[in-house]
Image (spheres, helix red, strand yellow):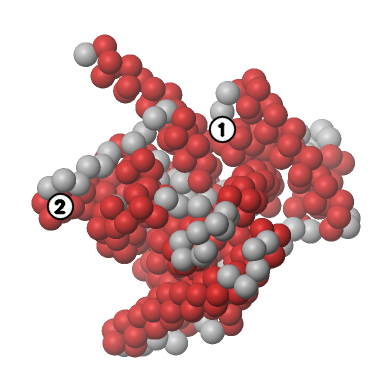
C-alpha cells in the first residue's frame, strides 16, 4: 500500500469520525475520533475469524505505519511547537511558579512513585529498571484533548495556563528521564554524578538550542513583512531546531517547547505594524488537524498491540497507579504553591483528572528495546492512554458542568 493511499485513508477517517463526533456524539473532535477508532478497531479484531479479509487489510495498513518515527520525528515537533507558540505568555508568566513545580518536581515525583507502585503491584516480578522506564514514559501529560473542553466550560484562564504549560514542559522532562533510564539500563551511566550530569546536559542544552534558534529566526523574520515567509520560517524552526537537538543527543521535545515560547516572546519585538495573526491561524489549523490524525492512529494501534492477561493486569494496575500518584503529587505541590504564593489559585480536580496521556507515551513505549520489557510496557501504556483520553477526557465536560450547576444551585 502506497504512502499516499495510507495518508488519504487516515485523513478521510479523521474527517468522517470528526463529523460524527461533533454532530451526533457531542464530544470534542480529538476524543470522539479516538473513541470511534478504538471501537471500530476492536470490532475488526473480534471479527477476525468471520471477516478475515477486512481485519487483515487493516492490520496490513498498521504494519506500513512506523508509529515511533511518525510521532517522534514527524508530528511531535509540530505539535509541541504549535502548543508553545500559541500559549498566552502573560498568563503563563503569572503561573510560572506553579507550572515549574508541576512540570519539573511533579513529573520527577510521578516517575519515581509510579515505578515503585508497579514493582509493588507485581509483587516484585517486574524488574526495577523496567518499572523505572515505564514510570519515565507514562509521567508526561498530554492535555491537548481536554483543552477545548476547558475553554468551552469556562474554566479560568489561569488553570488552562497551568495545565497547558505543565504538559508542554513535562513532555521535555519526561523525555530526558526516559533517555536517562535507557542509558542506565545499557550501562552508559553508572554513577549518580554521571546520571545528574546527563540530565543537566540534555535539558540545559535543549533550552540553549531552543532560545538560540528562536532568536535567529526572529531576526530573519524582521527582514521582510510577509506572513507567507514568516510561516516558512516558523516551520523551519519547528523541524530544524528539533532535528538539531536530536542530533546533539539533547531533549528534542524540550527544545521544541522552548523554541515556540521564545519565538513568541521575540515576536513582541517586531516592528509595531507587524501582524502575526495569519501565522497564529496557520499553527492553530496545524495543531487541530494533526491532533485528529494522531488520535485516529492511537485508536488503530489496538490492532498492532498484543493484549494478553499479564499485559491487561499490568495495564489496569498502571491506570490505578498513575491516577493515585498524580492526585497525591498534584495535591502536595499545590499546597506548597499556596504556602509559597498565598495568592496562587488552582483546581486539584482539573489538574489531576485533566492530566491525560497521549502520543508521546505511546511513541516512547514503541522505542523500548525487547530486552527491557517492551511487550508489557507497550500494552500497559496503551491501556493507560485509552483510559485517560476516552474516560477522563470524555467525562471532563460533563463533570465540570455538573460542578458548575451545583455551585449555582448552592
Between 348 and 54, which is closer to the camera in this rendering?
348
State how many labels appear. Answer: 2
Residue ranking furthest to the front: 273
Give the residue drawn at x 56%, y 28%: 27
Q: Which residue is mark 2?
A: 341
Between 120 and 17, which is closer to the camera in this rendering?
17
The mark found on residue 28 in the picture is 1
Q: Position of residue 397 (x, y in %)?
A: 44, 28
Instruction: Work out whether 403 lies above or below 201.
Output: above
Q: Nearer the observer, disc 1 or disc 2?
A: 2
SS label for mark 1: loop
SS label for mark 2: loop
Mark 1 burial class by Cα count in 10 Å: few <14, some 14-19, many 20+: some
Q: Position of residue 372 (x, y in %)?
A: 50, 70
Residue 246 seen by the camera: no
Between 291 and 286, which is closer to the camera in this rendering?
286
Instruction: Work out whether 12 lies above or below 105.
Output: above
Q: Position of residue 144 (x, y in %)?
A: 51, 46
Give the residue drawn at x 70%, y 33%: 17
Q: Position of residue 209 (x, y in %)?
A: 49, 79
Mark 2 burial class by Cα count in 10 Å: few <14, some 14-19, many 20+: few
Left or right position of 350 against 270: left
Residue ranking furthest to the top: 409
Residue 183 seen by the camera: yes
Q: Quadrant of the N terminus?
A: bottom right
Q: Of callouts 1 and 2, which one flags the residue occurring earlier in the amino acid sequence?
A: 1
Amino acid at each position: 500500500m502506497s504512502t499516499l493511499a495510507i495518508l488519504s485513508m487516515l485523513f478521510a477517517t479523521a474527517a468522517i469520525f470528526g463529523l460524527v463526533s461533533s454532530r451526533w456524539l457531542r464530544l470534542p473532535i480529538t476524543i470522539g475520533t479516538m473513541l470511534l477508532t478504538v471501537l471500530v478497531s476492536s470490532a475488526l479484531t473480534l471479527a477476525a475469524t468471520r471477516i478475515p479479509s477486512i481485519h487483515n487489510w487493516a492490520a496490513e495498513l498498521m504494519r506500513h505505519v512506523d508509529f515511533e518515527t511518525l510521532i517522534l520525528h514527524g508530528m511531535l515537533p509540530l505539535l509541541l511547537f504549535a502548543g508553545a507558540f500559541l500559549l498566552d505568555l502573560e498568563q503563563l508568566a503569572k503561573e510560572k511558579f506553579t507550572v515549574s513545580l508541576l512540570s519539573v518536581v511533579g513529573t520527577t515525583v510521578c516517575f519515581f512513585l509510579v515505578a515503585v507502585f508497579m514493582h509493588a503491584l507485581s509483587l516484585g516480578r517486574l524488574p526495577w529498571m523496567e518499572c523505572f522506564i515505564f514510570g519515565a514514559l507514562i509521567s508526561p501529560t498530554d492535555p491537548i484533548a481536554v483543552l477545548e473542553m476547558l475553554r468551552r466550560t469556562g474554566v479560568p484562564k489561569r488553570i488552562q495556563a497551568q495545565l497547558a504549560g505543565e504538559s508542554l514542559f513535562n513532555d521535555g522532562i519526561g523525555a530526558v528521564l526516559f533517555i536517562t533510564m535507557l542509558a542506565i539500563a545499557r550501562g552508559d551511566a553508572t554513577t549518580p554524578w554521571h546520571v545528574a550530569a546527563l540530565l543537566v546536559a540534555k535539558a540545559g542544552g535543549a533550552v540553549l538550542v531552543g532560545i538560540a534558534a528562536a532568536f535567529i529566526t526572529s531576526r530573519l523574520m524582521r527582514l521582510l513583512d510577509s506572513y507567507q515567509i514568516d510561516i516558512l520560517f516558523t516551520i523551519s524552526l519547528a523541524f530544524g531546531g528539533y532535528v538539531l537537538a536530536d542530533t546533539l543527543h539533547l531533549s528534542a521535545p524540550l527544545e521544541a517547547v522552548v523554541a515556540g515560547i521564545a519565538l513568541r516572546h521575540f515576536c513582541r519585538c517586531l516592528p509595531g505594524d507587524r501582524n502575526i495573526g495569519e501565522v497564529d491561524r496557520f499553527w492553530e489549523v496545524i495543531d487541530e488537524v494533526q491532533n485528529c490524525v494522531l488520535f485516529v492512529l492511537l485508536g488503530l494501534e489496538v490492532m498492532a498491540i498484543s493484549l494478553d492477561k499479564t499485559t491487561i493486569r499490568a495495564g489496569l494496575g498502571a491506570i490505578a497507579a498513575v491516577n493515585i500518584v498524580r492526585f497525591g503529587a498534584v495535591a502536595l505541590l499545590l499546597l506548597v504553591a499556596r504556602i509559597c504564593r498565598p495568592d496562587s489559585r488552582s483546581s486539584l480536580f482539573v489538574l489531576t483528572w485533566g492530566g491525560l496521556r497521549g502520543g508521546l507515551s505511546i511513541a516512547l513505549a514503541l522505542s523500548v528495546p525487547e530486552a527491557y520489557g517492551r511487550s508489557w510496557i507497550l500494552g500497559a501504556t496503551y491501556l493507560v492512554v485509552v483510559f485517560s483520553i476516552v474516560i477522563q477526557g470524555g467525562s471532563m465536560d460533563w463533570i465540570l458542568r455538573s460542578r458548575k450547576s451545583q455551585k449555582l444551585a448552592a
